Image: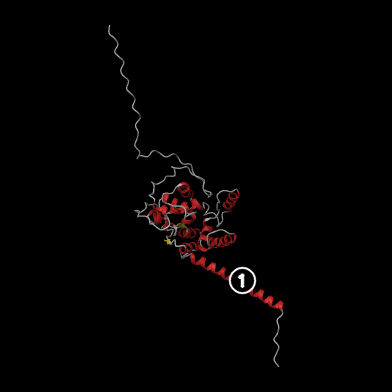
């Protein structure tokens, strides 16, 4: 006689289904965790080939221009400008600046322009492994990757990757590609003004231009240029160059014509004379913890003509007295 098929109770089928789902979920989470570790270790030694933001530019037809340069070759002023503009406590914190985050939350709660409290480490984690935009889920994953790179990369590698993957223009990534695009030479010998202008456009690289900046962008660039000297004097970049050979200060190489890339009409304007930090008052900028220094009034330029004082009118001599 044929054996009757064994019927599995409904509650047992549901239990097996739940076990199968949670088993699949556990394996997926474990796989993603191991993959994240592997990627972070690889990028400790290998430049990240592409990021989600770069893919978005390519898909949108904006192109992709990047040119990796190590910190051994990049001018120190670019590093100092990034620290002065984005994260003055970069060498002190462990990836998160709690004071800056709290300050940003208070400013945002009071209304007005939204301020961010992200450190350079957090921005690097977002730029390399994640996508642009907000959301608590993305911020949570960003915190996880920030924790990893702080412990597996170290400060110097974080800064190196940041300055090579940060967006510096429409379809342009990295300080070196930005310097070639805007100033016609690479980032090995940038002037303080050029480095400050690159740093000033980092928050909004698709809307701000480093050539002939105007309004807030110019004032913010002047503020950063003033902070570069403070970063140098206070040793706020010491964790990056400790035990390494830093590039020496030198004059920039002869400039070539800046690249003309599509979608950035503002770059074709004729650049004005180099702006001095003394020319305009320093405007309040996103909180970085670096105080602006008072600067003396500019001295008269030797190129300006010297105006002579108005001549004193000659008076007619008194008439001679009559002789007796």
> Observer-nearest residue: 293 or 54?
54
Q: Compared with residue 151, is residue 109 higher up or lower down, i.e. above or below?
A: above
Quadrant housing the C terminus? top left
The image's colouring method is secondary structure
> Observer-nearest residue: 295 or 282?
282
The residue carrying pointer 1 sits among few (fewer than 14), some (14 to 19) or many (20 or more) residues within 10 Å by Cα, namely few
Q: Compared with residue 126, is residue 303 higher up or lower down, i.e. above or below?
A: above
Q: Position of residue 8 (x, y in %)?
A: 70, 81
- Can residue 245 be seen? no
Identify the residue shown where x is 51% and y is 67%: 39
Q: Position of residue 163 (x, y in %)?
A: 46, 58
Q: Position of residue 221 (x, y in %)?
A: 46, 48
Quadrant housing the N terminus? bottom right
From this viewpoint, which residue is outermost toward the bottom? 1
> Observer-nearest residue: 27 or 216?
216
From this viewpoint, which residue is outermost toward the top? 324
Q: Which residue is mark 1?
A: 25
Dot 1: what SS? helix
Number of numbered discs overlaid on the protein picture: 1
- Can residue 193 be seen? yes
Q: Position of residue 230 (x, y in %)?
A: 48, 47
């Amino acid at each position: 006689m044929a054996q009757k098929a064994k019927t599995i109770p409904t509650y047992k089928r549901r239990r097996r289904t739940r076990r199968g789902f949670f088993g699949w979920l556990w394996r997926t989470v474990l796989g993603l965790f191991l993959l994240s570790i592997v990627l972070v270790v690889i990028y400790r030694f290998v430049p990240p080939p592409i990021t989600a933001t770069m893919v978005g530019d390519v898909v949108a037809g904006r192109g992709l221009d990047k040119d990796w340069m190590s910190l051994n070759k990049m001018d120190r002023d670019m590093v100092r400008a990034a620290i002065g503009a984005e994260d003055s406590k970069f060498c002190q914190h462990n990836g998160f600046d709690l004071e800056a985050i709290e300050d940003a939350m208070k400013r945002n709660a009071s209304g007005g322009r939204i301020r961010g409290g992200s450190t350079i480490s957090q921005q690097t984690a977002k730029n390399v492994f994640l996508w642009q935009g907000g959301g608590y889920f993305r911020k949570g994953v960003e915190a996880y990757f920030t924790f990893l790179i702080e412990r597996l990369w170290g400060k110097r590698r974080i800064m190196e990757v940041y300055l090579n993957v940060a967006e510096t223009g429409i379809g342009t990534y990295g300080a070196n590609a930005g310097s070639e695009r805007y100033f016609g030479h690479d980032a090995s010998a940038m002037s303080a003004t050029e480095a400050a202008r690159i740093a000033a456009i980092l928050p909004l690289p698709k809307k701000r231009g480093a050539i002939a900046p105007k309004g807030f962008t110019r004032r913010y660039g002047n503020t950063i240029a003033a902070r570069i000297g403070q970063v140098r004097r206070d040793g706020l970049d010491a964790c990056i160059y400790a035990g390494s050979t830093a590039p020496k200060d030198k004059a920039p190489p002869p400039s070539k014509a800046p690249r003309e890339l599509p979608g950035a009409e503002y770059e074709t304007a004729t650049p004005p004379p180099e702006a001095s930090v003394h020319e305009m008052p320093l405007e309040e900028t996103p909180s970085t913890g670096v105080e602006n220094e008072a600067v003396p009034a500019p001295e008269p330029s030797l190129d300006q003509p010297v105006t002579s004082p108005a001549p004193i009118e000659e008076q007619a001599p008194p008439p001679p007295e009559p002789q007796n």
